[in-house]
Image (cartoon, rainbow, N blue to C red):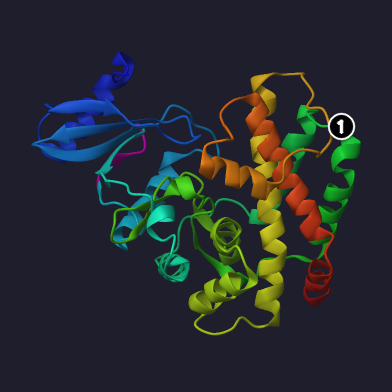
């Protein structure tokens, strides 16, 4: 896919600002995530760069905010170097990171992966403050309301889960000391490994938020055991977490499952408006889906796969919120 003609003038301005020329050696499409942005690997003077063109804007997807977050992270050597970023044009040019599979490279040394990721998150949270956007839990309220408006699942399928979410809202308040520069979407697609170190990318969800959002996101993806979770938290805090830190982490891990499930299902509902998803929260478990994704036997693209993934996330959140550990965490925070 070539650069759309309507976007070419903005791209030319970016190239001229970054390199003093509009000439490129080559342009190749790079498959992106779910943001809808157009991404390309370009070569200028024989060197590869990533060109990103925004295609959607709203109060949340605002390059004026997240380009600043990306620049702060890049200055902290946590994101690829930014050569140019114009929020008005919605065009950014960054260093291109040749990606390797961190999941495979760290297969036998998962502790190293967890330690390096925790250290990187800690460094991110210590950078100059990102611009604020919204209280994270108030943002979650909007996510819940948006999902409910779709009618994708029957109300009885999620009533217990959302009742438990209401219990969280009654007691969970972000400690002002926990407001940090937060990525807010550290899923594996947004963590690159170049064979030496980890890089964080795709900053459109970034803003000043609760430190436990990034910690919970990472834990849900890479901390498969209690020992790995403990290692993640000890590395991040520099010591064993205290009772309230542990309680916040327990709660936020389930909020994170809820977030990803609702975001996925809300997007799915837009693919087939008015078509309900059958079966309540029944379906393959999150662990089965992750195993299938790794083995290539589960396809996330398409309506059926995304419905299954979203429901698995909600089922995981419900199971976590029904546990004695979760109830105890709510008591600590009450």
Q: Position of residue 88 (x, y in %)?
A: 36, 34
Identify the magenta region: 83-89
The residue lying toward the viewer, choosing from 41 and 18, is: 41
The residue that appears at 51% across and 34% down in the rendered structure is 34
- Where on the picture, by quarter, is residue 302? top right
The residue lying toward the viewer, choosing from 297 and 94, is: 297
The residue that appears at 17% across and 27% down in the rendered structure is 26
Task: Report the residue that reaches farthest toward the right.
Answer: 156
Task: Report the residue that reaches farthest toward the top.
Answer: 5
Counting the numbered discs, the total is 1
Q: Is residue 12 magenta?
A: no
- Where on the picture, by quarter, is residue 63? top left
Q: Is residue 139 visible?
A: no
The residue labelled by disc 1 is 154
Q: Position of residue 248 (x, y in %)?
A: 69, 69
The residue that appears at 50% across and 74% down in the rendered structure is 236
Q: Position of residue 47 (x, y in %)?
A: 13, 40
Judge left or right: residue 211 versus residue 315: left
Judge left or right: residue 151 versus residue 305: right
């Amino acid at each position: 896919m070539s650069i759309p003609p309507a976007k070419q003038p903005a791209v030319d301005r970016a190239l001229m600002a970054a390199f003093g020329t509009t000439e490129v050696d080559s342009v190749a499409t790079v498959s992106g995530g779910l943001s809808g942005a157009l991404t390309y690997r370009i070569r200028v003077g024989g060197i590869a760069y990533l060109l990103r063109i925004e295609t959607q804007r709203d109060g949340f997807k605002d390059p004026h905010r997240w380009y600043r977050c990306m620049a702060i992270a890049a200055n902290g050597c946590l994101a690829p170097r930014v050569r140019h970023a114009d929020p008005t044009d919605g065009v950014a040019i960054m260093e291109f990171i040749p990606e390797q599979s961190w999941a495979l490279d760290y297969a036998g040394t998962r502790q190293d992966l967890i330690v390096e990721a925790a250290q990187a998150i800690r460094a991110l949270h210590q950078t100059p403050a990102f611009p604020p956007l919204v209280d994270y839990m108030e943002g979650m309220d909007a996510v819940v309301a948006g999902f409910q408006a779709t009618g994708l699942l029957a109300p009885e399928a999620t009533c217990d889960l959302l009742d438990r979410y209401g219990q969280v809202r009654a007691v969970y308040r972000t400690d002002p000391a926990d407001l940090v520069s937060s990525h807010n979407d550290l899923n594996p697609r947004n963590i690159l490994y170049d064979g030496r170190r980890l890089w964080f990318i795709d900053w459109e969800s970034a803003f000043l938020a609760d430190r436990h959002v990034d910690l919970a996101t990472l834990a849900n993806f890479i901390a498969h055991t209690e020992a790995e979770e403990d290692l993640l938290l000890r590395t991040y805090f520099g010591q064993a977490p205290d009772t309230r830190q542990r309680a916040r982490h327990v709660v936020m891990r389930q909020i994170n499952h809820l977030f990803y499930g609702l975001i996925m299902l809300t997007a799915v509902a837009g693919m087939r408006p008015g078509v309900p998803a059958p079966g309540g929260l029944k379906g393959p478990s999150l662990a089965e889906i992750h195993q299938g994704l790794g083995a290539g036997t589960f396809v996330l693209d398409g309506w059926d796969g995304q419905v299954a993934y979203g429901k698995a996330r909600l089922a995981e959140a419900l199971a976590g919120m029904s546990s004695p550990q979760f109830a105890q965490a709510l008591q600590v925070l009450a």
